[in-house]
Amino acid sequence: MKKVLYFNFILLVFFQCFPLIGSAQEPPSQANDYFKQFQDLPGSEDRSVFFFSTPNRYNQNSAYDWLDTVHVYLNSSQKTNDSIALVNYQLIQSQIYYDLGDYEKSLAISKSLYDTMESLSMDTKALILELMDSNYSKLELYDKQIEIRRRKRELGLTKNVAFYDIYSSLGQHRKAMRDYMAEEKKDIKEDDFYAQAIYNNNIGNYLRLDKSTPTALSYFKKADALLDVYFSDVLRVKPDSELVEANLLKGVIQGNIGKCYVQSKEYEEAIPYLENSIEIIKKYNTGKFSSDLVENTLEIAESYLQLDNYAKATDYLSDGMDPIKIKNILKKNRLYAAYYDRTGDYKSSTAYLKRNIRIRDSIDLTEANIKNQQLTSVVSQDLEYSRKMMEEQKEALEKSRNDIIAKDERISLVFISLIFTLLGFAGLVYAYLKSIKNQRLIAEQKHIIENSLVEKDSLLKEIHHRVKNNLQMVSSLLSLQTKNTRSKAAIEALEEGKSRVKAMALIHQKLYQNDDLSVIEMQGYIESLINSVQSVYKKGGHNINITIDAEGVELDIDRAIPFGLILNELVSNSFKYAFPHDEDNGKIYIHLRKIMGQEGFFEYTDNGVGLPKDTEERANSSMGIRLINRLANQLQTSLNTDKTSEGVRFWFNFK
């Protein structure tokens, strides 16, 4: 995370040190036919979710096309008496009117839904209250707006009732900025560059409206750089809806930078930013009324007018925009009056000035009183809210104080209990001290026993080691005897004896190598035994693939020795007789399973030439077969033999 923050900080510094007229990042495809997708959805709920989650929904069809279609759905819902669909389509209808700038119609619909809101879902309530909040703001009915925000807080849709945007609308920009900074800054994360861009843009806007232009410009440029870092952050997943909103914010910030340059009378600097802002807002706010677009158009018209580029100025003034706010209407009339004055058409200039005079005359009498009344109402509501917050905090403190008192009482009870506990503990200590002597004696005896056990284990390991060495000596003697014997039969008998001695020696070797002297781990033992047999019989280049499946099986010495000798005989027979022609595909499979408390199972198979036909006749005369049968008897079982299509299979169960 620190590396990511450091990288993003470098990008932020880069964008601040080298300011460029940023272009917004390409959003999700603008070719999507949202209108058709909306119509293809099956019901009102799906359509409502799609509509409100698609920011640039009027990209191909105008808001009026959407309004006509929603009106048809609304009539159909009224005929079928579908109350849920009626609410969903009325919400969509209200939002479309808001997007068109017809705030009174939008408010009328949302107010009718507000009156029946109790039975609706929480998501629907949130949409209704958000629409009413926005409409009251546009219509400058701030006391009503505060009531809606209180309702939001009561429903848990917001933590606090914010007043800063309302104070700014009433001209109290500095107070709005201070309240906004105190309320919002603490919740913004350091790596959330999108939220930081919004924060810096809002601070800059309060400063711009308060005529602190240079400071405002620095905040806007910082917001612009933060947004560029947000776009370049490949580690963050950006939903399509957030990308559209971020791009639209880019256009707003660019416009605010341009407005600052206009305030500073740096018109040539302002024009590129304003043009870029208009282009971005038109692209990402298609079909919606935007006061930012109106204001930026008027600002760029003023810039061209001040630069004596009358053609460009009139192009923007006659761009088909229809201001709603009084201040924008007055500014448009003032710009037309200035244009006609400069071009010598004084009659037209006078006409536009008279329009402004009439408008001012109609509002001057009431505007100041209305603003004062609104400000008084907002301040009183703010004070009442602050008083309620203080009462809540006081209640919380009182509750905390009561909790502390109750806690002190509990501590007193615990202290008294502790005293009695200590008295009881003192008696226990006395008894403990009395028993400590006995415990020491027990510990000494335990130490003696443990030392005896260690000594016993060492002696046992030494015995097994000596037995193994003795057996190896016997094996060496047999090897010497083999070298001094010329009879082939005698040599084979000696080699077989040596192999059997090695099998027993391996048992004792595994025992003294183990920590547990009572059992032998059979997987490792079988592997060692196979290696030993191979060293004796694998002289003709046998390519025998041996598979051992005995993982986790452990046997005691009474079972391990006869089992090892049986396996030694079987493997020796396979090497001697099963593969006489050095086959490349020779296979031996050894399987051993022993589950605690259950019967064990042993299986040995090879794919050699198999047993001869006179096997039963040879059994009486073959020492190896007689030895296997006797060893099987020691395991309290009998060896079973199955002749397969390829080779032979030996198996038996044992306890």
Image: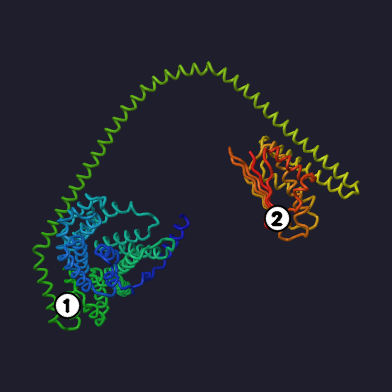
Coloring basis for residues: rainbow
Name the residue: 44% across, 57% down: 5
* Residue at image mark 1: 337
Residue 325 visible here: no
Q: Residue at x 14, y 81 (%)?
A: 348
Q: Is residue 520 left or right of residue 33?
A: right
* Front-most of residues 589 and 509: 589
Q: Is residue 55 left or right of residue 492?
A: left
Relative vertical location of residue 56 with respect to residue 6 in this rendering, above or below: below
Q: Quadrant of residue 480?
A: top right
Residue type (three-letter) at the residue carrying disc 1: Ala
- Mark 1 and mark 2 lie on one chain; the one further toward the N terminus is 1
- Which of the numbered marks, if any, corresponds to residue 218? none
Q: In the rendering, at what x and y percent does residue 409 appear?
A: 31, 27
Q: Is residue 496 visible?
A: yes
Seen in the picture, residue 265 relative to 136 is either above or below; the reply is below
In the picture of the structure, the residue carrying the numbered disc 2 is 647
SS at mark 1?
Answer: helix
Q: Amino acid at mark 2?
A: Gly
Which residue appears at 46% of the width and 58% of the height?
4
Circle 1 Cα neighbour tier, 10 Å, few/some/many (<14 / 14–19 / ≥20)? many
User: Percent x, y for residue 141?
Assistant: 15, 59
Left or right: residue 246 compared with residue 614: left
Provide residue 305's location: percent of width, then percent of height.
24, 78
User: The C terminus appears in which quarter of the rendering?
Assistant: top right
Q: Percent position (x, y) of residue 533?
A: 76, 49
- In the image, residue 448 sits, relative to residue 192, either above or below, namely above
- Label 2: few (<14), some (14–19) or many (≥20) C-alpha neighbours in 10 Å: many
